[in-house]
Image (tube, rainbow, N blue to C red):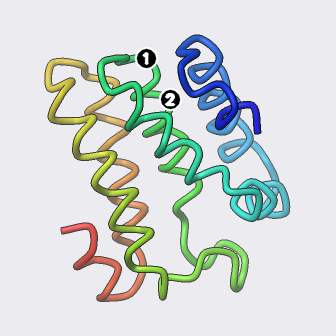
Amino acid sequence: KAMTGHAADGQLLRKCCGALWYMAYYGSDACVKAVLDAGGAEAVVEAMRGNAADGELQQSGCGALQYLAVPGLVPGMLTWEQVEVVAGWAKAVVAAMQRHAADAGVQRLGCGALQSMAAGDEECRQAVV
C-alpha cells in the first residue's frame, strides 16, 4: 500500500523497490509468494512506469522483478497462464533499459529480469520477446 498510496514519492518508491528486491533475493519461497500474492510485482511495475527518469528506481525495479519472476520456484506461485501480466512486466523492463541505455546496473538487472521471465513456457517466452 505504501507504493500505491505514494506514487509521486520517488525516494519512498526507490526504497520500496529495493526492499522487495532484497526480500525476493534473500527471502524464502514463502516470502516471495507473499510478495506476489500482495501485488508486489505489479506495484514495482507501476512505480517504474510512473518514474521512468529515475535510474536508481529502474535499477531496483529490474532487480526485484528478476527474482520475483521465477516460474516453478513454488508450485503454483507464478502462473505463466498470465501471459499479459508477464508481457507488462517485460515492457516495463525494456522501457527502463531503453531510457537508461548507459546505466550498466539497469542493463545488467534488466537482462536478468527478462531471462527470468523467459524461463517459463513457450507462451511466456513469446510474451517477453
Q: Horizontal placement of 92 versus 68: left or right?
A: left
- Label 2: how many Cα within 10 Å (few below 14, some 14–19, many 20+): many
**Image height of 2 relative to 112, above or below:** above
**Image height of 45 relative to 81, above or below:** above
Residue 57, horizontal then vertical, whole percent: 46, 23
Q: Horizontal placement of 128 versus 44: left or right?
A: left
- Image point 74% across, 54% down: which residue? 35
Amino acid type at circle 1 is Glu
Residue 82, horizontal then vertical, whole percent: 48, 80
Q: Quadrant of residue 97?
A: top left
- Image point 76% across, 39% down: which residue? 1
Q: Quadrant of residue 99?
A: top left
For the C terminus, the quadrant is bottom left
Task: Determine which residue is flagged by label 1.
Answer: 56
Residue 28, horizontal then vertical, whole percent: 82, 55
Task: Determine which residue is flagged by label 2.
Answer: 60
Residue 103, horizontal then vertical, whole percent: 24, 19
- Image point 66% across, 50% down: which residue? 40
Which secondary structure, mark 1?
helix
**Image height of 115 relative to 129, above or below:** above
> Are the residues at dot 2 and dot 1 in contact (C-beta closer than 8 Å)?
yes
The residue most toward the top is 11
Which secondary structure, mark 2?
helix
Q: Quadrant of residue 122?
A: bottom left
Gap between marks 2 and 1 measured at Cα: 6 Å
- Image point 58% across, 52% down: which residue? 41
